[in-house]
Image (cartoon, grey):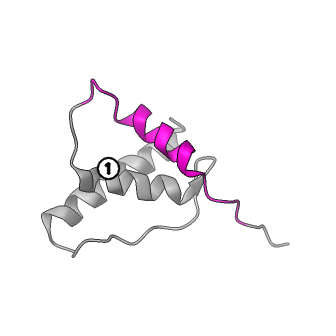
Amino acid sequence: MTHARPAAPCSADVDARMAQIFHAHRMPRSCEYKAGVRAMLECSEDGVLYTYPPCPFDIGTPQADAWFAGAGEARVILRDGQ
């Protein structure tokens, strides 16, 4: 039996989740870090990651490091169901 991949979460759902994660009282994060979180959330549904998005930055750069750190936070969020 083949399981169909659910539709990606709509942009409004991801936007709301990002606003919840990066609330006003949280320590600020870079755009690259937030992009890593967003990319992972966009590739998940109901806490399940269906594909690992490619990093849009050159590996070994500070931007890529920040993106991967954000992606790592998103994996924890998805795992813990936050």
The structure residue drawn at horizontal position 28% and vertical position 59%, both measured from the top left corner, is: 67
Side of 3 relative to 18 (left or right): right
The structure residue drawn at horizontal position 29% and vertical position 26%, both measured from the top left corner, is: 24
Give the x, y percent position of residue 37: 38, 51
Q: Nearer the viewer, residue 30 or 76?
A: 30
Q: Nearer the viewer, residue 31 or 74?
A: 31
Highlighted magenta segment, given as a residue range: 5-26
* Quarter of the view holding residue 62: bottom left
- What kind of element bears circle 1? helix
The structure residue drawn at horizontal position 53% and vertical position 67%, both measured from the top left corner, is: 51
Which quadrant of the rendered structure holds the N terminus? bottom right
Q: Nearer the viewer, residue 15 or 68?
A: 15
Q: Is residue 52 visible?
A: yes
The vertical placement of 73 against 71, above or below, is: above
Side of 30 relative to 77 (left or right): left
Which residue is outermost to the bottom? Answer: 58
Side of 73 relative to 9 (left or right): left
The vertical placement of 55 against 44, above or below, is: below
The vertical placement of 36 against 73, above or below, is: below
Q: Is residue 71 visible?
A: no
Give the x, y percent position of residue 34: 32, 50
Q: Identity of the amino acid at label 1? A: Lys
Residue 19 belongs to magenta span = yes
Which residue is outermost to the top? Answer: 25
Q: Which residue is mark 1?
A: 34
Which residue is outermost to the front? Answer: 12
Q: How many marks?
A: 1
The vertical placement of 31 against 77, above or below, is: below
Give the x, y percent position of residue 49: 55, 58
Residue 32 belongs to magenta span = no
Q: Please tell me how crowded label 1 is: few (under 14), some (14-19), or many (20+) other residues with Cα within 10 Å.
A: many
